Amino acid sequence: MRLNDVWRNISQEIGVYWKGQFERVPAASGVYAWFYPLKVATHTLDDFLAELEAVFSFDARLEGSPITQARARFAWRQINIRLHETRRPPTSPDLLRNSWEAIVQDEARFFELRKALLKASILMPPLYVGKTGDLRTRCWQHINGTGGRGFHDRFEQYALAQQLSKRSVRDLIFACIKTADSASATDPTEEEARAIESVVEEILKFVSAPPYGKR
């Protein structure tokens, strides 16, 4: 098998699931991520952008907005600095704003925009990345807050405090990839599969820096 052959059956190895579809998540090992749905519920661009800004303005280490401290020395003196990340005002380029305003005037075109944005949710940075030996079980654990409440509690408590439109893990999008290749002639042992999943998970976390996952 050539390496690029993985794309031939990719639709069978990758899945996207949402509210009402979680029971279809495969009971297989793999890596997964949760995404915030880009579901537009307003005609005002600034309101939509402000919500997205709030969703990603989270630091899992602090269970809230990012804050850090640093020290700097100047000769005999030492200065302590406290840094607190604040949200940007929801400003957008004029071209984007003008295009948005033109589209929202027509409900049919606005509906098509909303559909396109919702589909594009999985192209956004993930909120959380993980690995598991059973994707279906882990999906429901996150939804119900069982078997380790980390992501469930972090997201739902913050979402409630920020009055986000999506305040439950059940309202998010679950995407996953089965790491075991059913068509492979050399099936890895369970131990080897777990090692592969761990490496994939850590690389994804390193690159995407999911705000609701801890390092």
Image: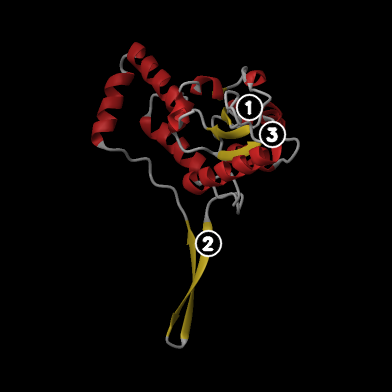
Task: Note whether 29 is above or below 111 in the view shown.
Answer: below
Amino acid marked by disc 2? Thr
Relative placement, left or right, of 102 versus 14 is: left
Question: What residue is at 37 percent from the left and 40 percent from the top?
Answer: 90
Task: Tell me the number on the disc at residue 170.
Answer: 1
Ranked by sequence position, the earlier of labels 3 and 2 is 2
Residue 50 in the image: state x and y as whole percent. 43, 38
Question: What residue is at 47 percent from the left and 36 percent from the top?
Answer: 51
Relative placement, left or right, of 107 versus 176 is: left
Disc 2 + disc 1, Cβ < 8 Å: no
What secondary structure is found at the residue carrying circle 3? loop
Instruction: Sort mark 3 into few (<14), some (14-19) or many (20+) by Cα contacts within 10 Å.
Output: some
What secondary structure is found at the residue carrying circle 2? strand
Task: Tell me the number on the disc at residue 133.
Answer: 3
Instruction: Sort mark 2 into few (<14), some (14-19) or many (20+) by Cα contacts within 10 Å.
Output: few
Question: What residue is at 54 percent from the left and 30 percent from the top?
Answer: 165
Residue 125 in the image: state x and y as whole percent. 47, 38
